[in-house]
Amino acid sequence: MFGSPAESAPEHAVAHVDGGARGNPGPSGYGVVIADPHGARIAEFGRYLGHHTNNFAEYSGLIAALNYALEHKLPALRVRSDSELMVRQMNGVYKVRSPELRPLYEEAKRLSRQLKWFRIEHVRREHNADADRLANEAMDRSK
């Protein structure tokens, strides 16, 4: 998270990200929905990842959203995720102890620092339905 909590947010895009794994670990995938600063949807995508954990898929979705923002020159991004673990790790509340997640966490931090402004926040699952749908569609591709 960059900037002070009292600092007002600049105009920013919003990315909803979700990841999942059936069996955990199992067939996994992520979904991402990105809206412009006015709320208009500008991108949605998902990807099948192979046999991984749910947390691996969550971080993969975050990295995909960050890469999209950088490739499309979006200077400010607010990410919303229903993964409390990932959000708390990215915000420095929890340490990343998993050797599998550590490189993904470091990549997400590196990418987020390239933006002029970045926030990540936890939302309830029902507020992340479109990203969840895309993640499930991606996992369905394993069949």
Image (cartoon, rainbow, N blue to C red):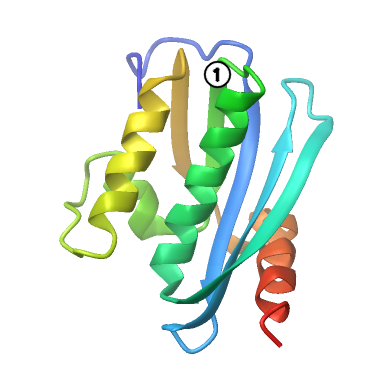
Question: In which quadrant will I find the C terminus?
Answer: bottom right
Measured along the vertical axis of the image, is residue 21 above or below residue 78? below
Q: Does residue 142 appear left or right of residue 7 in this picture?
A: right
Question: In which quadrant will I find the N terminus?
Answer: top left
Q: Residue at x 62, y 39 (%)?
A: 15
Provide the secondary structure element on which disc 1 rests: strand
Q: Residues within 10 Å of mark 1 (few under 14, many from 20)?
A: many
Quarter of image, res 27: bottom right
Q: Does residue 95 appear left or right of residue 67 in this picture?
A: left
Viewer-closest of 19 and 87: 19
Residue 20: % across, % down: 54, 71
Circle 1: residue type: Ala
Q: Which residue is mark 1?
A: 76
Viewer-closest of 75 and 78: 75
| Farthest residue, direction right | 40
Measured along the vertical axis of the image, is residue 105 above or below residue 37? below
Measured along the vertical axis of the image, is residue 129 above or below residue 78? below
Q: Residue at x 72, y 20 (%)?
A: 37
Quarter of image, res 14: top right
Residue 136: % across, % down: 69, 73
Q: Does residue 37 appear left or right of residue 53 in this picture?
A: right
